[in-house]
Image (cartoon, grey):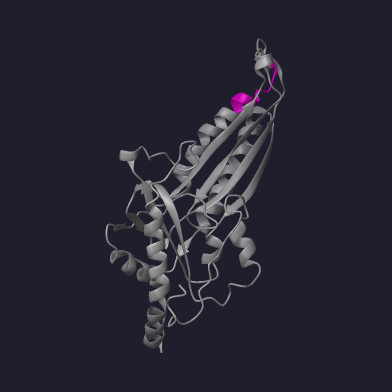
Amino acid sequence: MSDFKSLTGEVWAIFQHGEEVYPGGAQELVDTGLFDELDFIYGQHIWASLPLGTIDIKEGLASAYSDSYTIKIQGRGGNASEPESTIDPVTIGAFIVAKLQAVVARQKSPKDAGVISNTVFQAGDLNAINMIPNHCLLGGTIRTTSDEMRGQFKQALLTMANSTCREFGAMCEVEFEPGYGMIDNDIQTTGFIRCIANEMEETRVIQQKCMLDGEDFSAFSKIVPSTFVFIGATNPELGIDYPHHHPKFWIDERVLLYGLQLAVNAVLQYPHYFNEAQTASA
């Protein structure tokens, strides 16, 4: 960048910490107030489900709310040979997990994206396999694409879990943990990035639907016009086709060149784009 002496304005490179753990490093940086006066923030993420050279640029929603929940079911344990003398939390938990899919199916339009995934089911002890346990713990994530759906899913889950436990005479405790917000890509600046990406060689620009993953870049998109894109890093011919967080995850490192080229071109061309936009709105 030091070679471009005529570059106007300021360019900040954000080296962000703590992306994986809520509330995320982006929110902590936003809370400093240092970014409030910026004109535009650009971010990118290598993406294992896209082939090398593919750039996914979404206008509008790019990621979902990603909240989590836990459901603690308190029953009454006893010998498995006498289930009538127990309040079986395992059976109750199984009912709740099955009913969660009805919550998704009946609390949103089929045209909207949203999902509840129960990922934790803990109960009993393999060293006491003949015993019905006293309690059961469920947990999972709630991924939604609007404030309305977010509230509906939480309320429906709470009502369903409590009513199911009451039906069997058990006690229930439901807790929600807020996660990352939605990334809402600014339409105008995202169009600017799309134009730059279309000019690159050996790349293909697409626009997939909003992903349901959580991403803490959403903290930036709340305060400043922002664009967040996904750059394909998979190459099955080299055996590089494992998903994120898999023990064998790897990337075709040529993706770094595509990402660097897109970011640098955005920096170099943004002043011209910004001046044109200012003139058009005057």
Q: Is the residue 187 above or below the residue 142 in the image? A: below
Please state the total of marks drawn on the protein image. Answer: 0
Question: Where does residue 238 sit, x and y in percent of width and height?
Answer: 34, 39
Left or right, residue 177 beside residue 268: right
As for residue 122 lying within the magenta part, the answer is no
Question: Is the C terminus in the top left, top right, bottom left or bottom right quadrant?
Answer: bottom left
- Decide which of 32, 112 is in the foreground and name it: 32
- Decide which of 40, 199 is in the foreground and name it: 199
As for residue 90 lying within the magenta part, the answer is yes
Q: Is the residue 40 above or below the residue 163 in the image? A: below
Q: Is the residue 121 above or below the residue 131 in the image? A: below
Q: Residue at x 64, y 47 (%)?
A: 176
User: Which stretch appears magenta?
Assistant: 85-92
Question: Where does residue 251 sit, x and y in percent of width and height?
Answer: 41, 46
Left or right, residue 90 beside residue 9: right
Extreme front residue here? 3
Residue 111 seen in this snapshot? no
Residue 16 seen in this snapshot? yes
Which of the 4 image quarters holds residue 137? top right
Q: Residue at x 63, y 31 (%)?
A: 167
Q: Is the residue 123 above or below the residue 5 in the image? A: above
Extreme top residue here? 81
Mainly helix, strand or loop, the magenta region?
helix
Question: Where does residue 45 sit, x and y in percent of width and height?
Answer: 45, 55
Q: Residue at x 52, y 51 (%)?
A: 214
Question: Is the N terminus in the top left, top right, bottom left or bottom right quadrant?
Answer: bottom left
Which of the 4 image quarters holds residue 237? top left
